[in-house]
Image (cartoon, rainbow, N blue to C red):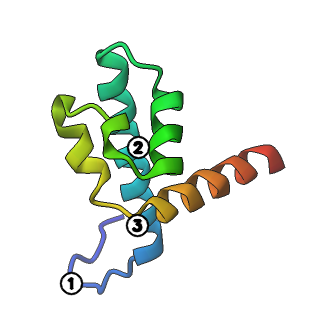
Amino acid sequence: MKKDVTETMAFKSEDMRRENIRHIVRLVDSALKERGYNSVNQLAGYLISNDPAYISSHQNARSIIQNVERYEIIEEMVRSYLESIEK
């Protein structure tokens, strides 16, 4: 069945925002691990203190994580955790 490309497409901005946050955290996690850091400890330190020095500048991770508010990262992590334990 062929899809009508002229049809209006709907998207959910909340879903896009959440996926963007997940993507950013994955990128930062990868960069921290590449540098030999414990990414959980480093991310927790950053989220608790708001000190960007916890995040390596490797692969521009420090700048990338600062594109999103800390509270949004925390909300997404809690939401994701709670969804995972409900299954």
Name which quarter of the figure residue 5 lies in. bottom left
Q: Which residue is mark 1?
A: 6
Residue 42 in view in this figure: yes
Side (left or right) of 2 relative to 46:
left
Are the residues at dot 1 and dot 2 in contact (C-beta closer than 8 Å)? no
Residue 20 at x, y = what percent? Answer: 36, 57
Residue 86 at x, y = what percent? Answer: 82, 50
Q: Which residue is mark 3?
A: 17
55 to 13, vertically: above or below = above
Side (left or right) of 13 relative to 79:
left
Q: CA distance from mark 3 to mark 2?
A: 13 Å
Which circle, 1 or 2, is nearer the viewer?
2
Q: Amino acid at mark 3?
A: Arg
Q: CA distance from mark 1 to mark 2?
A: 35 Å
Q: Could you say which is closer to the camera, residue 22 or residue 39? A: 39
Q: Amino acid at mark 1?
A: Thr
Side (left or right) of 69 relative to 67:
right
For the residue labelled by badge 2, is the local secondary structure a helix, a strand or a loop? helix
Q: Could you say which is closer to the camera, residue 41 or residue 10? A: 41
50 to 58, vertically: above or below = below
- Mark positioned earlier in the residue sequence (1 or 3): 1
Side (left or right) of 2 relative to 74:
left
Q: Which residue is mark 2?
A: 25
For the residue labelled by badge 1, is the local secondary structure a helix, a strand or a loop? loop
* Neighbourhood count class around disc 2 (C-alpha, 10 Å): few under 14, some 14–19, many 20 upward: many
